[in-house]
Amino acid sequence: MQIDNRIIDDLIIESAKQGNEISLWVATNSMAPLIVAGDRIIVQSIKEGARFRIGDIVLFRVNGELFLVHRIIGHRSIEGVRHVRQKGDASIGSHFLPVDSIVGSVRLVKKQNRTIDLTTKTWRLLNLIIGLVVGYIDLVARIYRYAVRLLPVPGVLITFARLVKRGIDRLLQRGIKALLGKNSVHKQAN
């Protein structure tokens, strides 16, 4: 018997709306090393109008189909709608998603040999710090990608690298000639 995944997805969403905790197996390593494929997460449903902090790890439902567990690294209002910037710790890019796509907040991470309670003061502080660091790295990466498109940085770097290589080549040639005892570094006048 095969069950349509959309039915299961709808059951998960309905369960969250009723205030139940949701238990899900993680399928990818986008949040490694904290959450890896094979870990089980316990997601606590959220109340209407809940506020999220940088560093919070939440379950999103994207485009009504895909479930995504990522960290919040920023907030923004886009055309009057609240959005959060989300990113997996091991992912390359980040994206804005509307707050209403958040299904719940990850409360527990169950690994093979231990359970991590993300609601403790220690983990809340660690997640805030990690969120700030991941957000900063993401910002620097976005600025770099934007600058590369606008500025002639790659051409300048290539030219500089060629000049350095040419200079090193000349020094090596002179050094080799000097080591071989050939006085051809400076030609003598006859």
Image (spheres, helix red, strand yellow):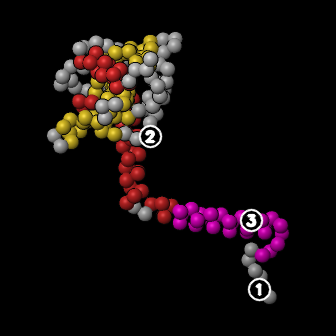
The mark that comes first in sequence, 2 or 3, is: 2
Question: Where does label 2 land, which residue?
Answer: 92
Amino acid type, callout 1: Ala
User: Which residue ends up furthest to the front in the rendered image?
Assistant: 1
User: Which residue ends up furthest to the left in the rendered image?
Assistant: 80
Residue 175 - label:
3
Q: CA distance from mark 2 to mark 3?
A: 45 Å
Closest to the observer, 145 or 188: 145
Answer above or below: position of 35 versus 187.
above
Q: Residues within 10 Å of mark 2 (few under 14, many from 20)?
A: few
79 relative to 97 in the view: left or right: left
User: Residue 93, percent across and down?
Assistant: 40, 41
Magenta residue span: 158-184
What is the secondary structure assignment of the residue under circle 3? helix
- The answer to whether marks 2 and 3 mark residues whose Cβ atoms lie closer than 8 Å is no
119 relative to 35 in the view: left or right: left
Q: Residue at x 65, y 63 (%)?
A: 168
Q: Residue at x 23, y 14 (%)?
A: 18
Q: Residues within 10 Å of mark 1 (few under 14, many from 20)?
A: few
Question: Where does label 1 land, which residue?
Answer: 189
Q: Residue at x 36, y 30 (%)?
A: 66
97 relative to 88 in the view: left or right: left
- The answer to whether marks 1 and 3 mark residues whose Cβ atoms lie closer than 8 Å is no
What is the secondary structure assignment of the residue under circle 1? loop
> Which quarter of the rendering shows the N terminus?
top left
Closest to the observer, 120 or 64: 64
**Residue 144 visible in the snapshot:** yes
